[in-house]
Image (cartoon, helix red, strand yellow):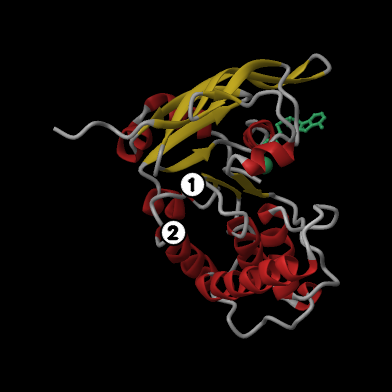
Amino acid sequence: MTDPAPDLLELRGVSKHFGSFRAVDEVGFTVRAGARHAVIGPNGAGKSTLFGLVSGTLAATAGSLLLDGRDVTRLPVHRRVGLGIAATFQHSSLFLPETVLENVLLAALRSAGAGAGTGLGGRRKAGARAAATARARTLLERVGLPTRHDVPAAELSHGERRQLEVAVALATEPRLLLLDEPAAGMSPAETERLTRLIAALPDDVTVLLIEHDLDMVFELADTVTVMHLGHHLTTGPPDEVRASAEVQSAYLGTTEVSS
Ligand code: ADP
Ligand code: MG
């Protein structure tokens, strides 16, 4: 028998309160290394807030987060990026006036520590930039934007922007990639391409995905977590989750699954 994959991420009773409102309330589950793990739940369930706690853009009110057994709960975003956590957000964080290539390059250089103020010599800096440029081109190819390098990000279609966001996140060489509704606003063809892209990511990139397109979720995910009103309802294999009465009732009465 082979050993089960170790946990890459563990959430232990994680909470985020906004005043007296509990957007995320004592949520606990684990994400296996190499997983394609989806988080679903009705609008307002606390999914994006939970991602903020994992990426570090939000500070947890209580509980702890462990990456590879290491407590990262109090680490700032850039330290978590350094440890391999990368995120795309529900609302875009691209540099719109910059070109497509430059957006990916900036992320690659930042994560390589070759950004401004690191004191690298001129020649080493040029070498780092050349290597990062090559990597950025490869990533743009992988996400399906090979001919759009020199276009300002502002000129991309909605679907292309989301593809670019994935390339930007991958440029930091993450071990854990957080995708918050990457298919939102995409055409069926774009969603299909994105699904294939995520499915083709190497196993050393663990994917934690928030998505309201349940077809995409059930096509991609090997594990599904359901949240409702800030609570963790269940985590399990897709078929079990789909059949769960508790999950069905959480969705009953909501015509829209998420936002
Ligand atoms: P989801 O992504 O599952 O739709 P969110 O995590 O965005 O849900 O939001 C969960 C709840 O927390 C919502 O009711 C939302 O209004 C609330 N919320 C999110 N961010 C804030 C904030 N900064 N201040 C106050 N309430 C917030
Ligand atoms: Mg959300």
Left or right: residue 181 versus residue 89 is: left
Determine the residue positioned at 54% across, 73% down: 138
Left or right: residue 136 versus residue 240 is: right
Question: Residue 172: x percent and y percent?
Answer: 62, 54
For residue 252, above or below residue 214? above
Determine the residue positioned at 80% across, 14% down: 20
Binning the other alpha carbons within 10 Å of mark 2 as few (below 14), some (14 to 19) or many (20 upward) gives: some
* Ligand 2 quarter of the rendering: top right
Front residue (pair 119, 221): 119
The number of callouts visible is: 2
Residue picked out by circle 1: 207
The amino acid type, in three-letter code, at marker 2 is: Leu
Q: Secondary structure at mark 1?
A: strand
Front residue (pair 141, 26): 141
Question: Residue 222: x percent and y percent?
Answer: 35, 43
Binning the other alpha carbons within 10 Å of mark 1 as few (below 14), some (14 to 19) or many (20 upward) gives: many
Residue picked out by circle 2: 201
Q: Which mark is residue 81?
A: none
Q: Quadrant of residue 77?
A: top right
Determine the residue positioned at 42% across, 37% down: 224
Q: Disc 1 vs disc 2: Cβ atoms closer than 8 Å?
A: yes
The amino acid type, in three-letter code, at marker 1 is: Val
For residue 145, above or below residue 256? below
Q: Quadrant of residue 92?
A: bottom right
Question: Along the polypeptide, which appears first: circle 1 or circle 2?
Answer: 2
Determine the residue positioned at 68% across, 81% down: 149
